[in-house]
Structures are given as C-alpha cells and as structure tokens.
Image (tube, rainbow, N blue to C red):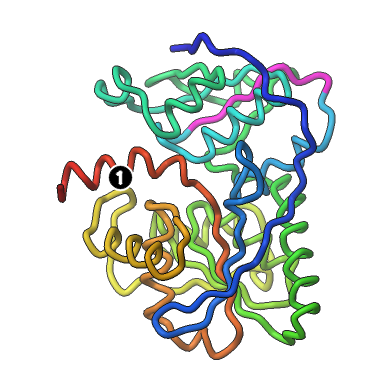
Amino acid sequence: MKTQKDKALPCRPYMLHSPIEEKLFEPHTIYIKRDDLLSPEFSGNKARKFYYYLQNDFPHIKKIVSYGSNQSNAMYSLSVLAKIKGWKFDYYVNHLPSYLGENPHGNFKHALDNGMTIHVGEDVSTAMIKKSILFIEEGGREENAEYGLKILADEIAIWKKEQGIEALNIFLPSGTGTTALYLQKNSSDCVYTTPCVGDVEYLKKQFLMLEENEKNHPFILVPSKKRHFGKLYRESYNIWLKLQDKMGIEFDLLYDPVGWLILLENPEIFQKPTLYIHQGGLIGNESMLARYQRKYD
C-alpha cells in the first residue's frame, strides 16, 4: 500500500532544543520538558532517537526498513525522516485491521502521506538487509539513539544550573526504555521510569540489550496494577483530561496517562525538584480519541 503524495518536506535546520515550563498539579510543583514542541514535523523522543541520522550524511542509504505496531509513533517519525532525506520507507506490521486499511487515520495515515510502503504479515529479517538499507529496530531501540539523547541530558543540565537547582528527579514513561536509559547514562540526576508496553522484567531486558552496566540503568517504578498496553481505561482518559484542564498541555493518550498515574502513586519523588519529559506522540491521539469516544461516548 502506497500513497501518491511524494513531495519532499522543506529543507530546514532541525535543532534539538525545547522549553521547560513550571506547572502545578495535585498538589505538586513540576517542570515539564516540552519535547512535543521541537518542530511541527519532527518532535518528541523519536526526534531525539533519530537525530543522529538527520544530522549526518549517509550517501549509500536509499531506504529505511523498520517494523512494529500499525499506529506506532516511531513509524510516523521514520516516515518524516525518510521524506526529509529523500529515502524510501518500508514498514512491516503483523496485522492491519480492515477498518484502518480502508479508513487510514492517526500515525498510520500520516506515515502513508509521507510515502511509507506498508507490508502486512511479511517477515522482516536481517537476511534481507543490504548496504543500501538502514534497518531500525522497533521503537527506535538502537545505540545511535544516544546521540540525540545526550543532547537532551546536556540541555537539562544547563537549565538546572541556570535555575540554581542542585539535584533533580527526572521522570518519563517507557516503551522500549531507550530514551530513559540514555538519558540516565548521560545525566548526573536520577531518572525514573515505568513500563507501559511490558512488565518490569521486559523493561530490564530492553535496557540490557543496549547497556550491560546496570549502574547506567534508570530506576523503575513498579506499577500498582497491571495495565495492558493499548487497552482503554477510564482512569487513563480521566487523568488525560485533567492534565489538559489544569496545565493547558495536551499529552499523549497511550503512554502519558500511565506515566502520570504511576508518578502520582510515588509522591516521594517530589521531595526533589521534578522534571517530566513530554515525549510528543500527539498525532497518535487522533486514533486513541476515536477509540475512547467509541467505548465511552
């Protein structure tokens, strides 16, 4: 499945620097790192993860190949990267609902608009990888992600010094945990995270794939109860609405509600100034909101 739109994105400098806003929420003062505001096309933690490829030249690369879910934030960001660089983009999914195929929306639609070719139920294996292909693991779990995430750590360190803050607690929810891992590795502050995709053991395994030294691993907050990834929970929708009402900030509907629920279950973190990393992913809210409205009307 291809889209007919193949117009390249405008050539422009993409710089990694986002503001930090001070907010009050139940009843904690918290700082929000607004990585959702990095750029209209290339934002959030995926912009950090893929910044290495944006900033460097790869004359031998003609195509990106990756895989994952059919509404993945990484899928959309890779489609933007491919369009900026003038590369083709092939993406593999295990399943594509007939409704989504007939009525593209959310990240899936925008990735198609950027020229993505979708492969359903086909095997993506390293055997097919050639020198002209850039293969990206699901969710952007790879060593080159450290390049952009070190910049994030440096930005936070500079801001902390300007604010006269000696020690900071940093929190963000995790999928593969790549962002939290490389942020902790390059930061003198304590980084807290919680699993959204799998359980605690899954997240630990993800960390070990990229970094054997456990001293560089973030501190994992254990969820008080099991929440299945992608399943709709009324408490998740309610806190998403409350965050938007109290802060005036729209958060992602997939990861952020889980992150905020678990962060508020651990108020001891707020004993130090606390920074929440807003990782973008707002295009995905198009499909998530539609699902919530169908379920809870």
- Measured from the top left, where is residue 255 in percent x and y? 42, 56
Q: Is residue 18 visible?
A: yes
Relative to 248, 134 lies left or right? right
Q: Is residue 194 above or below residue 233?
A: below
At label 1, the amino acid type is Leu
Is 287 one of the magenta-colored residues?
no
Which stretch is magenta? Answer: 59-67
- In front: 282, or 167? 282
Tell me what residue is drawn at x 43 percent, y 65 percent: 259
Tell me what residue is drawn at x 77 percent, y 46 percent: 15
Q: Is residue 187 above or below residue 60?
A: below
- Measured from the top left, where is residue 226 in percent x and y? 28, 64
Disc 1 element:
helix
Crowding near the residue tagged with mark 1, few <14, some 14–19, many ≥20 C-alpha atoms within 10 Å: some
Q: Is residue 243 above or below residue 285?
A: below
Q: Is residue 245 above or below residue 112?
A: below
- In front: 215, or 180? 180
Tell me what residue is drawn at x 47 percent, y 60 percent: 249
**Residue 114: quarter of image:** top right
Q: Which residue is mark 1?
A: 289
Q: Is residue 130 visible?
A: no
Relative to 93, 209 lies left or right? right
- In front: 208, or 290? 290
- Measured from the top left, where is residue 187 in percent x and y? 73, 70
- Measured from the top left, where is residue 42 in percent x and y? 63, 39
